[in-house]
Image (tube, rainbow, N blue to C red):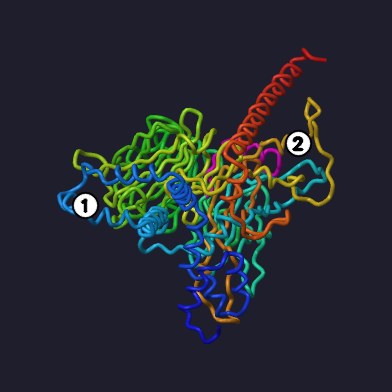
Amino acid sequence: MDQLPDEVILNLLQFLEAREVVAVQRLSSRYLALGRDNVVWKLECFNHSRAEAQLRREQLFAAQDSRLTELRNAVSALPTPRSNDEDLDSPTITDGRQSDPAATERQQWQRARANWEPGYPGERIDYYEEFVQRHADINVDWIRLPKPQTNDKETLREATGVALLNDGFDSGPVHVVAPLDDGSVCIFDNTPRSTLEPGGGGRLFSRSKPGLLTGRDDPNESHAIMTETGAVECVSVNPSTQKGSFAVQNTLHEVDLNTLRLISSKPYPFRVTALSSTSGFEPLAVGTNHTIHLHDSRDPYRPSETAQLIAGPTSQHATLSQPGPLALLHHPQSNTLWTAGRFTSLLNYDVRRFPRLLGTLHSGARVASLSLLPYPLLSPRSATGSTLVAAAAYKGKGSLELLDLPSRPTLAGPDSEKVKIYQNRQTASASKLLSAVPHGGRFVFSDGDGNLKWVERDGRTEVRRCDINDFIPQSPSHDPSPRAPRADIFGRQADDLNAANGTVVQKILPVHGPSTSSFLPSGVDRPDVPTQSLLLWTGDGELGVLKFSGSKGGKDAFYDALEDQEQVGGEELARRDAERQFSARMRRALERSAEEVRFVRGLGMVG
């Protein structure tokens, strides 16, 4: 085998199962590189996809009834409005291809694979890691938050925001920046594991003093201040300057992440509801309830002694006709700023001529988060552009929206390009979507029922799903010492309530890591597999890192999730989903009843 060329070995690997290819990687460093070849694992990803399963079902159905096959061939041979004269003048070629079953099957297989292909020209996808993320077991490692400086075990620290800090290189460290409800700022080390380094493991790297963001020494006062607004996009980190911006009520605090000291504070006229991410090339956008501002850290805040408008001069901010921006996103290709939120339209501003409004896109849904994919999914693969991914809610149901943005920045005017919009409002979720981001060759989003769902880049084909409540530990503080559970007025334990579909993921951040498909010699620091995990921030203030690895249940590292769903059956999956939704509705109804009883008891009407 050692004398065979690499091309022959790669051809042989295509006839092996996924577990067998993984076993081949353990032989030597050469077979490790060959066993992670992108062509081999790209074929494995397609063979375990829904597109290939649908193709097999169609071929099996056609083989069972020959008359139906002839009818399909006759219909496909009919001329269509898009047929040209050359197609109509050459029926013999089409008939010859259809008369050969092997050629027809091969043509259908190539067409199905081309339609499934998630990659774009110039895009780098590690299909070995892609296969792991599609079929390996899911684990969530919860980050241990600092304990409060009290003896009360019931008092728990909560994260009020989260952002990622890295140096922009694949091999660099990855840190998690999170403010806590006591007004402190914590930095956790989440560097991926490698052959020479054990990795960060989510350990506490550094922490500021409590009350840094609130200016209060009392933890209760700091907790009330930090949790009053409830903004999701309240943390923005600039990796080039190693500085972080934190929104607390109507004040924007700038903190040096190296020393964890407060640099400056700037108040805004209204409560800050959203911050944009910045890489050093774009200015920080600050969204309040009624205005949009561009923040410049080089311009210090000076209180004015003269009379002026509440929000400042109109040339320095954009006024919103409807309140509630929740997501701000810079589009680097066109140098524009996208704004979305509780209003039903997406606003596009010109950053160079801010606050000039370039145009609007009416969606009809209320958007909770925005993310960007630098490839046009709805246009031909040869076109240039990008795709705006929005997690929204439409009439109480989830809506995953893909907006194909052109390379030109203008949207207004009769000569502007029409933006293509794809909206999945049927199969996305029964509850509103909270966050949606690209993850490898797929999209992942979270909903109001606590589900995490992966779909193909078409926005509708489901790859896999999980419930975050299945990974919640019994002790929210992750303290191994036992803790007496609390009960509500109906005698239910707090842990039971927590497990009854009570936790949601309100923000997802992909932790990008280095590619593992390229071969590195022995002795060189090789990254572990997989490296592209997901950082989760739950509604309970917990931080977790979702990884794809073997579970404690005894399952193999690789298993076919698609076949597992097919064995259960569509009716069984629908029944389980209906039971889960019914349990969530009953839980919310009981919580409302409990709140009414507490309110009446506070009035002295209940003994």
Mark 2 or mark 1, whichever is nearer to me: 1
Taking the image as drawn, is residue 77 in sight? yes
Near mark 1 (Cα within 10 A), the count class, few <14, some 14-19 or many ≥20, is few
* Disc 2/disc 1 C-alpha distance (Å): 67 Å
How far across and down, in percent of the image, does residue 190 sit? Answer: 62, 61
How far across and down, in percent of the image, does residue 317 sit? Answer: 37, 40
Horizontal side, residue 598 vs residue 313: left or right: right
Identify the residue at image location x=51%, y=36%: 271
**Which amino acid type is shown beneath numbered disc 1?**
Pro
Report the front residue among 568 and 269: 568
Horizontal side, residue 378 vs residue 470: left or right: left
**Which amino acid type is shown beneath numbered disc 2?**
Asp
Report the magenta residues as a range: 215-235
Task: Please give the residue where the numbered disc 2 appears in the rendered image.
Answer: 496
Asked whether the residues under the numbered discs 2 and 1 touch, taking CB atoms below 8 Å apart as contact, a structural biologist would say no
Near mark 2 (Cα within 10 A), the count class, few <14, some 14-19 or many ≥20, is few
Rendered position, 99 above or below 37? above
Q: Give residue 91's mark.
A: 1
Rendered position, 13 above or below 486? below
Q: Quadrant of the N terminus?
A: bottom right
Of pointers 2 and 1, the one earlier in the residue sequence: 1
